[in-house]
């Protein structure tokens, strides 16, 4: 008997494994405290995984496959991946273990170590999901100090012939990022997002009864995330028809009233492999090709870049730089994460909305994560270990390979410039330019010092001053130091003192 392990983020219905029907194959899936407890997850994330896994296992059995599904409360469940595998192998006369490449380093190491102790052979398969191999980015940038995403993205476009005319981009232009930075106009009403309505009260109670520590909230009678392939395909269809025409233009916009705007919200479905990145991109490109009179090239290119550019690039960085990447702290930041990250109670309106939305929905789009929450963390000097833990737990789509590279790399510059060529920091001016948060804030976006001055403004200059030795020679941020150096000494001291006051009283912001 061959034992095939399926992890919780390997729910690929189209995997070649399932083309093969045999009484000699036993599939195994497991719910484990090992996975629920290694970080404190959002309640919607745990529900999302358990729901999707149980439905996938049910589908396996409906297709007449032999399968063991270990629920968390199964008396045989040791709550450890390898300990469970051990007794399953022994009790079922397993002659061979097969598993798909895990996407997380810790699980990859755990399974490699376990396999080396077995007396039976082990075979490892690709997940047949990603558009690049684990080591492809490493090979592509061999001998280079910087890993420029744009170069990798162009290679991927050529490799798959996406939006290409032979060896050149369709329009002669690779990247339309400059066209995709518009604020949502005041009277503009984005499309009402497609959400699902699934009663998950049983799973919610199951999680509560087993005292799994979670964060955030959920309406268990009305769970709105897709947890099946059918729902995921519906969301993809909805996106290309209703959101793609405005996706690129407003992909960086933030608004107090609209949590989804024109974002696809497909990341959870893709990260657990209910959808493949190639089918997502191909469907979007096909719809664009049929509707070019309504959808500009900037919309589709921005979407394609997120998936075959950033998503694949971040995975490549992960496998190139782990495990060292998880300890990098370039600025040696040590500040504790403020309590309002767990409660959402702060007078900073942008943070209140971005964190509050994250707690309520297990979701925030990339600019809320990067330029509001991440921006604040970097300006304040918060320890990246704490930031990683928060981001990994709170978002439904957060799996370490994509979370840590975006958080510790892109957002916090803790890697010293592997992912980003400069730190992504900004004052209130940027947040006001891209959102309506500042208009109703307790703080004054235009003030650097004094009562009600926006913390982002003084912390911005404090960040550059305290990290002068590490950043002053960076050619991409030279202007910040030109401005800082030209600032009258009295004014500069006032700004830096204001920042010190805010940092000392960070819990009260």
Image (cartoon, rainbow, N blue to C red):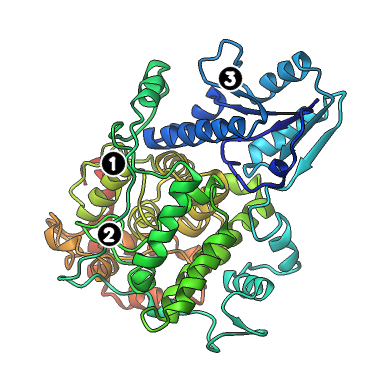
Can residue 38 be seen here? The reply is: no
Indicate the secondary structure of the residue bearing disc 2: helix
Mark before the other along the chain sequence, 2 or 1: 1
Residue 433 screen position, x and y as percent? 25, 71
Mark before the other along the chain sequence, 1 or 3: 3
Q: Which residue is mark 1?
A: 360
**Foreground: disc 3 or disc 2:** 3
Does 192 appear above or below 108? below
371 relative position to 62: left or right: left
Mark before the other along the chain sequence, 3 or 2: 3
Query: Badge 3 local density, few (<14 within 10 Å), some, or many (20+)?
Result: many
Q: Which residue is mark 2?
A: 456
Residue 45 screen position, x and y as percent? 42, 37
Tell me the residue at 36%/73% (across/down): 245
Q: Which residue is mark 3?
A: 79
Query: Badge 2 local density, few (<14 within 10 Å), some, or many (20+)?
Result: many
Does 140 appear above or below 335? below
């Amino acid at each position: 008997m061959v034992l095939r392990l399926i992890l919780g983020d390997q729910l690929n219905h189209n995997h070649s494994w399932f083309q093969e029907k045999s009484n000699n194959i036993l599939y195994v899936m497991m719910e484990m405290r090992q996975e629920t407890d290694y970080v404190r997850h959002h309640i919607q994330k745990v529900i999302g995984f358990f729901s999707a896994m149980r439905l996938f296992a049910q589908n396996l059995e409906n297709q007449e496959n032999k399968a063991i599904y270990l629920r968390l409360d199964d008396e045989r469940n040791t709550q450890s991946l390898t300990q469970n595998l051990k007794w399953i192998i022994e009790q079922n006369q397993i002659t061979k273990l097969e598993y798909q490449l895990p996407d997380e380093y810790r699980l990859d190491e755990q399974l490699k170590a376990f396999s080396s102790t077995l007396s039976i052979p082990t075979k490892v398969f690709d997940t047949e999901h990603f558009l690049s191999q684990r080591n492809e980015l490493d090979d592509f940038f061999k001998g280079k100090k910087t890993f420029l995403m744009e170069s990798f993205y162009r290679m991927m476009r050529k490799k798959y012939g996406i939006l290409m005319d032979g060896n050149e981009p369709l329009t002669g232009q690779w990247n339309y990022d400059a066209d995709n930075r518009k604020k949502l106009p005041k009277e503009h009403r984005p499309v009402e997002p497609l959400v699902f309505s699934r009663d998950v009260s049983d799973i919610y109670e199951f999680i509560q009864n087993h005292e799994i520590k979670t964060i955030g909230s959920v309406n268990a009678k009305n769970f709105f995330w897709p947890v099946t392939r059918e729902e995921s395909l519906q969301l993809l269809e909805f996106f290309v028809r209703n959101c793609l025409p405005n996706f690129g233009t407003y992909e960086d916009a933030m608004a107090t009233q609209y949590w989804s705007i024109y974002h696809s919200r497909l990341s959870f479905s893709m990260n657990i492999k209910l959808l493949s990145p190639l089918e997502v991109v191909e469907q979007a490109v096909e719809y664009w090709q049929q509707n070019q009179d309504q959808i500009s090239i900037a919309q589709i290119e921005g979407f394609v870049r997120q998936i075959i550019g950033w998503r694949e690039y971040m995975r490549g960085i992960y496998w190139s730089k782990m495990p060292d990447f998880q300890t990098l702290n370039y600025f040696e930041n040590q500040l504790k994460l403020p309590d309002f990250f767990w409660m959402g109670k702060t007078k900073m309106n942008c943070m209140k909305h971005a964190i509050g939305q994250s707690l309520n929905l297990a979701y925030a789009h990339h600019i809320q994560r990067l330029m509001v929450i991440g921006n604040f963390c970097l300006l304040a000097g918060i320890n990246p270990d704490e930031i990683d833990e928060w981001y990994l737990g709170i978002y439904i789509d957060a799996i370490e390979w994509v979370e840590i590279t975006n958080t510790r790399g892109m957002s916090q510059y803790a890697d010293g410039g592997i992912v980003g060529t400069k730190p992504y920091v900004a004052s209130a001016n940027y947040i006001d330019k891209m959102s309506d948060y500042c208009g109703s804030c307790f703080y004054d976006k235009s003030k650097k010092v004094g009562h009600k001055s926006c913390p982002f403004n003084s912390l911005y200059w404090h960040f550059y001053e305290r990290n002068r030795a590490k950043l002053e020679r960076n050619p991409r941020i030279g202007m910040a130091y030109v401005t800082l150096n030209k600032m009258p000494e009295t004014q500069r001291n006032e700004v830096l003192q204001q920042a010190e006051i805010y940092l000392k009283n960070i819990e009260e912001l």
